[in-house]
Image (cartoon, helix red, strand yellow):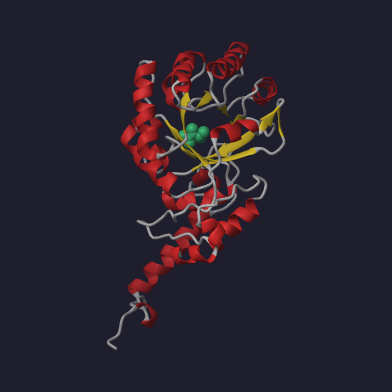
Amino acid sequence: MLGKLAAKPALARGNCQAFPSEDSAARCALMSSTFQLDTGTSRANPMPAPMKRLTVPAIQRRKFKGKTEQPLVMLTAYTARQAQLLDPHCDLLLVGDSLGQVIYGLPSSLQVTLDMMCAHGAAVVRGSYHSVVVVDMPFGSYETSPQQAFASASRILAETGCAAVKLEGGVAMAETIAFLSARGIPVMAHVGLTPQAVNTLGGYNARGRSQQEHEKIISDGQAVQSAGAFAVVIEGVIEPIAITLTKTLEIPTIGIGASAQCDGQVLVTEDMLGMFERVPRFVKRYEEIAETISGAVERYATEVRARSFPGIDQTYQPK
Ligand code: KIV
């Protein structure tokens, strides 16, 4: 609880320490015992923060002379509580526009709005203090002009407190990436299978099988680096493309359906936790959370119908 802060005067004075990135166990211990997370929805973030947040330059430095000793760990997060649980283990949290499908049940990410991204981005920042939080720019909020992109991105940064935005596109978005980066907005690019372009791509299949498309994705990666992107997500491409980009780019590559040789990996958290029956082939399911939820709710429903819940422990008696 918050009261425990007083037990660690060095940290309570705001003398926060950054932990070596490899020490996620230490981070976990600190965040879950010394600074027990207050999970009350209105008091999600203890003050002072127990540690310094990673920064965009620190993420970039993880790739040195073309090599990343320790791969970057990124997962999507959309809510404060989810962010609290993921934060000790991750370097980056992505408030992806995949929240359209995952949270809102929309048919694609095309219907996602800036309002949604700002609300969820702010929740994830409130629920984390270690990871760099990156918020996706939704479809239609940045493609018209660099000025439109700046207006949307600056709103996202101001309203959420996140450190960076992500946008889809390579060569076509290079001017916009340069415009934002030169004006203090770190940009993570996204090339290969770009879900916002589902209607031009014709689906969510792996990209880069033709020589022409292979070359285009390589040029896209080079263009976003030259424009000033600090990192690039490479999604759903044949592995040789991801390997070439990882070897030739100086900025970190973050793969999803790409290659283990990328400088980091990202997945949609609900996919890897087993919330959905159908997931893309590149997803590894680390849990079967949907079954756990379904089982718990079934037990609850049975007890309510049998009037065995609430029991004596969950009811108030007169003193
Ligand atoms: O929206 C999202 O979640 C993403 C990741 C899948 C990279 O863009």
Q: How many marks?
A: 0
Q: Residue furthest bottom?
A: 319
Q: Is residue 149 left or right of residue 18?
A: left
Q: Residue at point 34% right, 24% down?
A: 151
Would residue 11 be visible to someone looking at this image? yes
The image shows residue 126 at horizontal and vertical percentages of 42, 48
Q: Quadrant of residue 31?
A: bottom right
> Between residues 189 and 133, which one lies in front from this camera angle?
133
Q: Is residue 125 left or right of residue 50?
A: left
Give the vertical position of 318 relative to 156 (above or below): below
The image shows residue 60 at horizontal and vertical percentages of 61, 30
Give the vertical position of 145 relative to 273 (above or below): above
> Between residues 140 and 71, which one lies in front from this camera angle?
71
Q: Residue furthest left?
A: 318
The image shows residue 178 at horizontal and vertical percentages of 48, 17
Give the vertical position of 205 relative to 213 (above or below): below
Q: Residue at point 41% right, 29% down?
A: 137
Q: Is residue 243 left or right of residue 194?
A: right
Q: Quadrant of residue 58?
A: top right
Give the vertical position of 37 relative to 257 (above or below): below
Would residue 113 be visible to someone looking at this image? no
Q: Residue at point 41% right, 39% down?
A: 161
Q: Residue at point 54% right, 61% down?
A: 9
The image shows residue 51 at horizontal and vertical percentages of 54, 50
Q: Residue furthest top?
A: 212
Q: Is residue 76 left or right of residue 199?
A: right
